[in-house]
Image (spheres, helix red, strand yellow):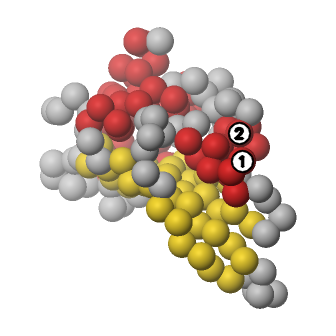
Amino acid sequence: MPQIPLHYVDLRTFCYATEDEKRVEEALRTFLPEEFEIERAESEGHFGDRILVLSARVERADEIRHVLSRLADLESFDDLIDELDDRVTENTELFLRLDKQGAFAGDVRLGDGITFRGKVEAYPAKKEQAVENAEEVLERLRDDR
């Protein structure tokens, strides 16, 4: 199995009209390597308000390691490992929701605001294999901290 069994990690958050774009970007950057490019797309809310979608796709192994190392700061990291069966889809994707407010303050915790989606390598491409691979990499992260 490869050192980092993830094909990529997508991080995404929304910046609503009532939020400061720089602060929302800073929250997202909590999980990203330095100088990583963030894509921006404008959308419109139900009442015509502006919504900015900030997203980043991390594909290189060293950069994925950086994102995962930030996840290792979760207080509930052991709970995350225990919940992998619920967090990995049949399509071998690992989903997490991270707290945007906490991320702005530099804290890493589960919550609302930032979506983490990681495509887990699994051969064959089955949920059970993906859960096993995700568990292995997360346990390695936990043991290294």
Q: Position of residue 90 (x, y in %)?
A: 36, 60
Left or right: 21, with 121 as reference point: right
Considering the numbered disc 2 on the image, is that residue within a helix, a strand or a loop?
Answer: helix
Could you give the CA–CA distance between mark 1 and mark 2, rounded to whole angstroms?
Answer: 7 Å
Residue type highlighted by circle 2: Phe
Front residue of 42/125: it is 42
Evaluate whether residue 140 shows in this view.
Answer: yes
Q: Position of residue 132 (x, y in %)?
A: 31, 37
Evaluate whether residue 111 shows in this view.
Answer: no
Identify the residue under disc 2: 104
Residue 92 sits above or below residue 99 on the image:
below
Identify the residue under disc 1: 23
Q: Position of residue 99 (x, y in %)?
A: 69, 44
Q: Image point 47% across, 62% down: which residue?
A: 39
Query: Where is the N terminus found, in terms of image quarters?
Result: top left
Q: Are marks 1 and 2 in contact (CB under 8 Å)?
A: yes
